[in-house]
Image (cartoon, rainbow, N blue to C red):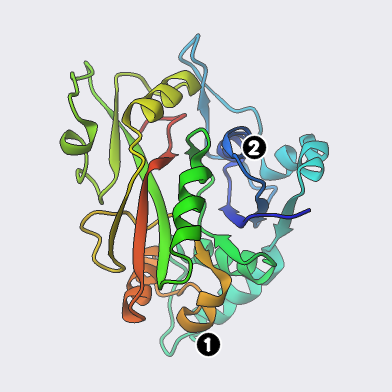
């Protein structure tokens, strides 16, 4: 089967987020993408939850990653979704990391290092020209999110450019304000994300689709990598050949994704952001 790109989902203790994430990709992608789930310690008890729209109560459909994978084995296999259990490799890596064998100084594993490690494991198993690593397990894409993103990627593929969908984060209000222009009123509030005003603890599929349809703009913005004045930095669509020049994710702390954007800047790459391709962050549980 011909895949357009490989999407890498690093996960730990989030089987309920992961379930929603996979559903969103299968439901809202206009093209076929190879999906790789990279997990560790899959029997660890979950610390995520969803919200029942009718009762407003928090609940867990799955208690572990293993439970989710086993319950959905037929679906995952049928959709060519690969799962990599990186537990043993991560345990060995973490020990070297603490002993100072990865870097000159000894470090304790920080938040983000395990995600960077899983992204790199997924990248090593990628056989497509295009890659989208660092697709968080609590991401949820807009309908046909990949159409415009892949259009501009094909248009500028010969340039030194990587491609970014618009990162959307819910913002809770006691009463949702009247919004005349979401792009001017609710952008740049947090790390150049577009904000989704809501008065609930979750966003439904219908509300998400309506938001995306209303505020979608069939155009793009371009800025140098590392600048971060107009565009966010995750997730990134780029060609695998760029790794030969830029390298894999760094393990120097929690800012690995920002550092990755900065490294593209050092190699004089630009990033093009689609204003009609949205990726929602934690829409199903507003925090």
Work out whether residue 182 or residue 234 is closer to the camera in this orientation and state it.
Answer: 182
Q: Give the quarter of the figure containing the C terminus.
A: top left
Helix, strand or loop at mark 1 = loop
Tell me if residue 15 comes above or below residue 153 in the rendering: above
Badge 1 or badge 2: first in the primary sequence: 2
Q: Is residue 16 left or right of residue 57?
A: right
Which of the numbered marks, if any, corresponds to residue 101? 1
Of tags 1 and 2, the one toward the viewer is: 2
The quarter holding residue 124 reads bottom right
- Residue 156 location in percent, x, y? 43, 64
Work out whether residue 192 or residue 5 is closer to the camera in this orientation and state it.
Answer: 5
Q: Is residue 250 left or right of residue 65?
A: left
Residue located at (63% from left, 44% from top)? 31
Q: Residue furthest front?
A: 155
Work out whether residue 162 or residue 79 is closer to the camera in this orientation and state it.
Answer: 162
Q: Is residue 204 left or right of residue 85?
A: left
Residue located at (60% from left, 75% from top)? 93
Q: CA distance from mark 1 to mark 2?
A: 40 Å
- Residue 151 location in percent, x, y? 49, 51
The quarter holding residue 106 reads bottom left
The quarter holding residue 127 reads bottom right
Q: Residue furthest bottom?
A: 104
Helix, strand or loop at mark 2 = helix
| Residue 68 appears anywhere in the view | yes
- Residue 73 location in percent, x, y? 80, 40
Which of the numbered marks, if any, corresponds to residue 26? 2
């Amino acid at each position: 089967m011909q895949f357009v790109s490989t999407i890498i989902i690093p996960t730990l203790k989030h089987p309920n987020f992961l379930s929603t994430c996979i559903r969103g990709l299968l439901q809202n992608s206009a093209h076929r993408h190879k999906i790789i789930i990279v997990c560790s310690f899959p029997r660890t008890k979950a610390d995520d939850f969803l919200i029942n729209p009718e009762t407003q109560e928090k609940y867990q459909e799955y208690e572990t990653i293993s439970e989710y994978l086993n319950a959905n084995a037929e679906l995952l296999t049928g959709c060519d979704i690969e799962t990599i259990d990186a537990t043993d490799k991560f345990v060995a890596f973490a020990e070297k990391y603490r002993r100072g064998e990865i870097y000159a100084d000894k470090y304790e594993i920080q938040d983000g290092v395990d995600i960077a490690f899983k992204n790199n494991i997924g990248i090593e198993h990628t056989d497509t020209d295009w890659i989208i690593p660092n697709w968080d397990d609590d991401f949820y894409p807009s309908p046909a999110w990949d159409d415009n993103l892949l259009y501009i990627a094909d248009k500028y593929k010969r340039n030194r450019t990587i491609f970014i969908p618009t990162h959307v984060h819910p913002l809770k209000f006691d009463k949702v304000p009247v919004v005349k222009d979401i792009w001017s009123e609710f952008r740049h509030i947090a790390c150049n994300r577009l904000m989704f005003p809501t008065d609930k603890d979750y966003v439904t599929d219908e509300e998400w689709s309506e938001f995306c349809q209303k505020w979608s703009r069939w155009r793009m913005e371009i800025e140098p990598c590392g600048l971060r004045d107009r565009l966010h930095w995750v997730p990134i669509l780029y060609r695998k050949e760029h790794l030969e020049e830029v390298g894999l994710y760094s393990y120097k702390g929690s800012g690995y994704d920002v550092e990755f954007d900065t490294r593209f800047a050092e190699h004089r790459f630009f990033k093009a952001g689609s204003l009609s391709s949205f990726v929602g962050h934690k829409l199903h549980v507003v925090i």
